[in-house]
Image (tube, grey):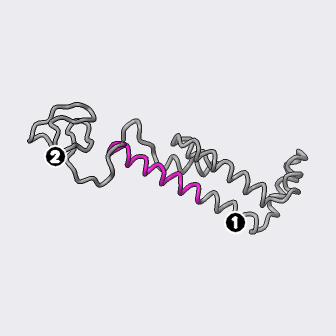
Amino acid sequence: MTSTQKRPWLAAVFAFVYPGLGHVYLRKWLRALLWFGLAFATAFVFIPESTFQAAESGSIQAALEATQSLGSDVVIPILAVQAINIIDAYWTAIRGNRTVSVGPDVPVGSDGATCPNCGKELEEDLDFCHWCTTRLDDDAVK
């Protein structure tokens, strides 16, 4: 694993802690901001105001009782956002690693000749790599 590749399992763990943190780890800033916003909006829409008031009262016991009385109509949407966020962080890391391992300018599954130095796709009519300027021999191209 190179320094630019990210660990998908770590992105998923961060996403489990709070939606968007896995994307912050992956440096996908807009996506992280959208997940933060979606988690906040879901909580704001589905959690009753009485639960927020109990949490603001400062009494830990009141806050625990208010959160324990939440029904499935509140819990299911919050858990759905959490689960989808974890999956998205994991797959975003895998896709990012696939791009890094092949090279950002080479499509995955490309069947053309590649440069032995940088691994990027070559143009057939050139005797050098136009990406890294390595001179190519006929037998060096794979």
Which one is closest to the eye, mark 1 or mark 2? Answer: 2
In the figure, is residue 16 to the left or right of 77?
Answer: left
Q: Quadrant of the N terminus?
A: top left
Look at the image and say whether residue 95 sits in the magenta stretch: yes
The amino acid sitting under disc 1 is Ile
Question: Which range of residues does the magenta coloring cover?
Answer: 84-104
Read off the residue under disc 1: 76
The amino acid sitting under disc 2 is Lys
**Where does residue 70 sit, x and y in percent of width and height?**
80, 63
Query: Camera-side residue: 48 or 68?
Result: 48
Read off the residue under disc 2: 142
Is residue 117 depicted above or below 110 in this figure? Answer: above
Could you tell me which secondary element the residue under label 2 belongs to?
Answer: loop
Name which of mark 1 and mark 2 comes first in the sequence. 1
Picture quadrant where residue 71 is located: bottom right
Q: Residue at x 40, y 46 (%)?
A: 97
In the figure, is residue 60 to the left or right of 21?
Answer: right
